[in-house]
Image: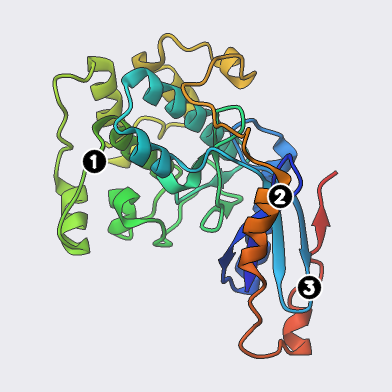
Amino acid sequence: MVYLCTSSPVQGSCGDIFIFSPPSVFKEKQILQKVTSAEHPFLVSLYATFQSENHLFFVMEYLPGGDLCHLLEHQGAFEESKAMFYTACIVLGLEELHRNNIVHRDLKLENLMVDVHGYLKIVDFGLSKDGFRYGDRSKTRCGTNCYMAPEIIDEMAYSRAVDWWALGVVLYVMIMFQFPFDAEDDMELFESIRNDKPALTEELSEEAQCLILRLLEKNPCHRLGYSEAGAEEVKAHEFFEDIDWEEFLERELMPPFKPDVSGLTESTRQSECQAWGLMPPAEAISPEAQELFEGFDYSAE
């Protein structure tokens, strides 16, 4: 049993419960440590990991704006300028991941969260793969169905371009308020992803339409971002013509939405967290199992 915890600027913390195998726990911890050491503005940070007799804890950066899915549900479809802002955050985050030879493999609305300043951060590296350089390939089928690239569905050897496909899905949903490929069941969904062209309206700018289609290119070799230039190729697209990428990295721009944290008091956060409690394991953890988590504790500098 793993509690994924978050720590806020005010005292008090809260978390979600996940179940992982020991190897996957250490893998994600290793990737989070690597991501944190990069100190990138659009990637979540890990503050510490520790354990009790029966539980593991990840203490993460607090992101009070919630995830992008929640934001869309409350605000509806985004205007292009707003979608551009969030897409730029993701592009820069993916650029840093790929620079560090990490492929995310589960980029989706729920794994994009708004920080206290109103910028997006990429979170959840449970399906990510480290040591994945340009030119490397994997056949592991993983991810979330609606965001899967055709090559993952067909169990072909895939590259880092699967992250750019997922970005195309995210951008489409932000602007169109629906998924580019949808169906009654998974089989129909996969057929749609393989064969259908995403529907676009004339209300979208030519630049937005072009970017979506370039990212949702079925052939990964022709997909925007596939080349060794990667993110630089995406950043050069006309959709981002008005963006100063250096200003963006310095977070000097006004975000379209900034979460209200004025009501986030110590007492309210503590009362929320006390309601969770610690769920005891179904059975006592054996000494042999405890040894599997030796060396788990970590504290960021």
Residue at position x 29%, y 57% in the image: 153
Do callouts 2 and 3 mark residues in contact (Cβ within 8 Å)?
no
Q: Is residue 15 left or right of residue 85?
A: right
Residue at position x 44%, y 48% in the image: 110
Quadrant location, the C terminus: top right
Query: What x and y, as percent, mark residue 192?
Result: 16, 50
Task: Establish if 163 lies above or below 202.
Answer: below
Mark identifier at residue 125: none
The secondary element bearing badge 2 is classed as helix
Kind of residue indicated by mark 2: Ser
| Any part of residue 300 in sight | yes
Q: Which residue is mark 3?
A: 52
- Residue furthest out toward the right: 301
Kind of residue indicated by mark 1: Gln
Q: Point out the tag, 1 or 2, that comes first from the N-terminus.
A: 1
- The crowd level at tag 3 (other Cα within 10 Å; few <14, some 14-19, many 20+) is few
Cα separation between marks 2 and 3: 25 Å
Query: What x and y, as percent, mark residue 199?
Result: 14, 34
Q: Between residue 60 and residue 13, name the one nearer to us.
A: 13
Q: Which residue is mark 2?
A: 267
Q: Which residue is mark 1?
A: 178
